[in-house]
Image (cartoon, grey):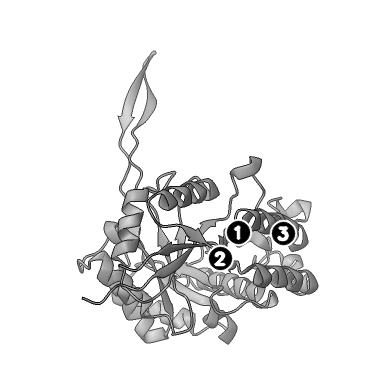
Amino acid sequence: MQERPATAHRLGFAVKVLGDGGLPSHDARRWASEPHLRHSLEHLAAILDYVDRHDIRMYRMATALAPYASHPDLPQFHDQVRECADALAEVGAVVRARDIRLSSHPGQYTVLNSERPDVQAAAVAELEVQAALLDAMGLGPEAVVVLHVGGIGGGIDAALDRFVAGFERLSDRARARLVIENDDRTFALADVLRLAERTGLRVVWDILHHRCHDPARMSNRDALAAALATWPAGQTPKIHFSSPRLDVEVRPVRRGRRVERRLVLPQLRAHADLIDPIGFEAFLRDAPAGRDFDIMLEAKAKDVALLRLRDQLAERGLPSVGGKVTVPPG
């Protein structure tokens, strides 16, 4: 039997830094206080110093890094990327020198396949801003903007058609940055792969979403292989990994003058604070051989969860070298 080659995987976390007392991720002031990208970049620089000190080589930026930059009714914020061109280039130089992979992930209100023209137009504007930020930093094609497919109105096929129509409204630079992700309720990996075939988009596979919603019954190994195959040779794919929340919550419930306690069981799709190190190790050792890929950890404890997992993996024979967890051949 041929030996499985060694692989290496950057681990990343999203937006908030909880360690060292916490760090702000962006200028979060309301529009009336005149927030600006220049202030967000100061926060980002501090985060980049933090992740460099801890040898973390992957980070998801706040989507609101350029506050209100795509808001249709606040044009005074629309020119922030150009106004901060020099500062963005400086940040990009630091990112490249430190080999930190950046990304962004617009949330539930960025719906490229919306049935409402105004919502779709807002999604196009937001994706253009996200792409412009990464371009202004001078980052390579692995710095991506992750997006869910969106709404289900009219059924799966109609929703996919609307996504393609929305995708065609994007500039070439925004299309080049965009990647698509499966979700936990509507668009399974099989649907996202169909969309990738139509658009040429790369796929970010989310393992917890896959286990929650997978009508095709694809194994983790087959699903991962299919998602990785959408990334061109020479680019390192990325995936999302989280563990399901397992703890029971106790909530007070008022009944008349009495307050009772009620046990609430977590939903399978809820993210845990930490990553299960045994399950994560098994996943890595079972991954298809021969290709490195990076892993965004979607754990509630953010960087703290990443550092804890990395220490636990090292104890189990998967050390981190140069910011990458190495899986030995075998």
42 to the left or right of 275:
right
In this view, 178 is above or below 212: below
Question: Which residue sits at x=39%, y=66%?
Answer: 151
Secondary structure under the numbered disc 2 in the rendered image: loop
Residue contact between numbered discs 1 and 2, judged by CB atoms under 8 Å: yes
Residue 143, horizontal then vertical, whole percent: 56, 73
The label shown at residue 62 is 1
83 to the left or right of 108:
right
Q: CA distance from mark 2 to mark 3?
A: 16 Å
Q: Which residue is mark 2?
A: 104
Q: Earlier in the sequence, mark 3 or mark 1?
A: 3
The label shown at residue 45 is 3
Mark 3 or mark 1, which is nearer to you? 3
Question: Which residue sits at x=73%, y=70%?
Answer: 88
Residue 300, horizontal then vertical, whole percent: 47, 46
Residue 185 seen in render: no
79 to the left or right of 139:
right
Residue 97, horizontal then vertical, whole percent: 68, 71
Secondary structure under the numbered disc 3 in the rendered image: helix
